[in-house]
Image: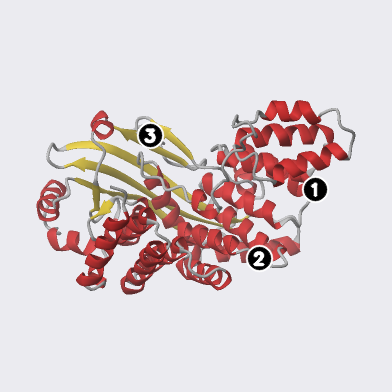
Amino acid sequence: MRHPLPLFLPPVLALALLSGCATRYVAGNVDKPGSGDGIGDVVAFETAADFTAKPPLCLGVLPLTLVKPEFGPADDVRKALHAHLAPSGVSLVPLQKIDALTSKSGDEAQNLRAVAKGSGCDTLLSGEVTDRSNRFWGVYSEVRLGASLRMTRVSTGQVIWRGKHTAVVRGGGMPMDVVSAIGGVVAAGVNVREEQVTRTTHDVARRLVAAIPNLKYAPDRDLVAPAAAPAVASGGVTTSVHAFISGVEQHPMPQLEGELLEALDGPSWSVPQDRIVIADFLLQKAPGSSRAMQEIASARLRLGEPDAALAMGSKALVIAPQNPELHFLQGRAYLQLDRPAEAARAFVQAAAAAPQPSANYFTAMGVAYNQLGSYDRAVAALGRSLQLEPGRPYVHMQIGVAHVGAGDDAAAAQAMRQAAVLSLAASDAGAAAKALSTLKAMGIESQLPAEDLEALEKRIATLKPS
């Protein structure tokens, strides 16, 4: 029999139902009780000195075990880990090859040795599903999943990295009246559907992969155009932003505001620190300028300060709630903060607010959906991006990530091949090499003819500088 929640909720739990938390990565003792568990989205991890001295060049994910039989299945968690490792570019041992090399009757040490010998990869991931539950109380639901991983350097037997995390996705809440009670039942019911179970699985996988040093993939650089070169004065000396401010600060408004906006619109000030100086000065003179707030938020994001970018962008949205670029900026900040569900909503709002949506909005939307494991939505969003702006290699790469996550290796290989071909057409050997390395990391190169792979590799080699 299912029991309703009590009429009174402790303040901490009530607050947890109403608010979201950013993921916190805590280096420490993974064995400490409570590490990586409970409210707060904490990922606990440990990195050995041997990892830092000799980072892994390849990885393979062995079948996970179950702490309790009712925590199964484990294969969905394993596949999600493999999918989130692929975009990092690290060479991955195909799951099918690992399955062929492991024995269900063998212990973990035996399977580690067998996979290392058969695949040539000396660093392998193994672990357990430590928690799993889907609970429903009428107006409140909770989907919970936990996993513990360890990376072993098989040749030495040393565990060089460990990580532990439990993800919890909650829906519904305490009703305030009859109408909200009905809404709470609906929200709680939706939460336990397959989509929320998938999201929780990918939350665990994405966050654990992000805790492995040097593997976290930051897509923001691929979502926006590269910055212009910094300004150079007529005498060949780089212009000082402070000298520029000193030269215009005595000008009357609105002339001053026009000059500051012109400076932000032009190619002269591309360095984020300089743009913050100009935008800050504009904000002093025009405290209600959403444009100044937007520029500060954008610069903070480029400097790797997503919290500051999100705070300033939120202030700007109060003033200009229909500005699609502000929603796009917020979504990018959420991606950097490892909050893809909120990022996806922000990108949808950006596309809805724009009279003529940018392809970038749908590309970013696809990235967020990939991180959530919503692969069908990712393919749809990325397809729309290509309709608006055909020929972007990065979009084809993300389509490949979506297809491999959905289990369509043939479509994934074709998407990665297209990304490499388009990059070569643009004489971008680096992007082409990345597409090819991601293809191999996913373990799907067998989906393409050997002569195609050889031709791509030769073409990439000819483009690389000597």
Query: Which marked residue is nearer to the observer: mark 1 or mark 3?
Result: 1
Left or right relative to 209: residue 236: right
Q: Residue furthest front?
A: 235
Which label sits on residue 319? 1
Give neighbour class at mark 1: few <14, some 14-19, many 20+ (Cα, 10 Å). Answer: some
Picture coordinates of residue 143, whole percent (x, y):
48, 56
Most foreground residue, 289 or 317 = 289
Q: Amino acid at mark 2?
A: Pro
Picture coordinates of residue 46, whole percent (x, y):
33, 33
Most foreground residue, 230 or 223 = 230
Q: Is residue 446 above or below residue 72?
A: below
Residue located at (23% from left, 73% from top): 449
Name the quadrant containing residue 406: bottom left
Which label sits on residue 357? 2
Residue located at (61% from left, 37% from top): 272
Picture coordinates of residue 49, whole percent (x, y):
26, 28
Residue 231 visible in the snapshot: yes
Give neighbour class at mark 2: few <14, some 14-19, many 20+ (Cα, 10 Å). Answer: some
Q: Is residue 210 above or below residue 74?
A: above
Most foreground residue, 171 or 64 = 64
Is tag 3's residue or tag 2's residue first in the polypeptide sequence? 3
Residue 65 visible in the snapshot: no
Q: Amino acid at mark 1?
A: Ile
Secondary element at tag 1: helix
- The reply to whether dot 3 and dot 2 touch (C-beta < 8 Å) is no
